[in-house]
Image (cartoon, rainbow, N blue to C red):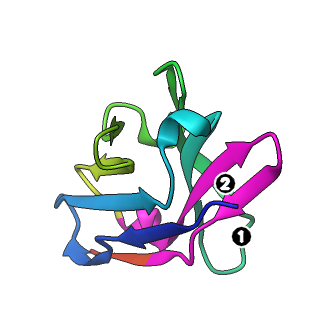
Amino acid sequence: QVQLVESGGGLVQAGGSLRLSCAASESIYRINAMGWYRQAPGKQRELVAGITRGGTTNYADSVKGRFTISRDNTKNTVYLQMNSLKPEDTAVYYCNAKKMSGDYWGQGTQVTVSS
């Protein structure tokens, strides 16, 4: 199993920025892919951004050009830099790790964007 600990959420005004961090309990080289998902009240959880072991990234259309996923292999940490935040970005953000043994999730961190 891998434990994931998120941090960096908070309250920000529209147009502002936040950076989320997800620290994994093991080397991220042992993880096939990592990603950030979000879930707003009354909505399904959706993929925001992902990064594979090889470094390939993908983004939801709604965040392209505003969000950037990256990683620091030496710290076993994946980041989500969020710029130009909008009220519709308000949600609980979850870190996800995909391994052969299954999917693993962090506890979530709240992001609230005020208008």
Asked if disc 1 and disc 2 are in contact, CB closer than 8 Å, the reply is yes
What is the CA distance from the residue labelled 1 to the residue labelled 2?
Answer: 9 Å
- Does residue 23 appear to the left or right of 72 in the view shown? right
* Residue 43: assigned label: 1
Q: Amino acid at mark 1?
A: Lys
The residue positioned 36% from the left and 51% from the top of the image is 77
SS at circle 1: loop
Q: Amino acid at mark 2?
A: Glu
Q: Quadrant of residue 109?
A: bottom left
Tell me if residue 81 comes above or below residue 72 in the rendering.
Answer: below
Choose between 57 and 105: the one closer to the eye: 105
The region drawn magenta spans 87-109
Tell me if residue 80 comes above or below residue 45 in the rendering.
Answer: above
The residue positioned 30% from the left and 49% from the top of the image is 75
Q: Which image quadrant: the C terminus?
A: bottom left
Q: Quadrant of residue 99?
A: top right
Choose between 75 and 84: the one closer to the eye: 75
* Mark in front: 1 vs 2: 2
- In magenta segment, residue 27: no
Would you name the residue on which mark 2 appears? 46
Q: Which image quadrant: the N terminus?
A: bottom right
The residue positioned 34% from the left and 39% from the top of the image is 71
Tell me if residue 32 comes above or below residue 54 in the rendering.
Answer: below
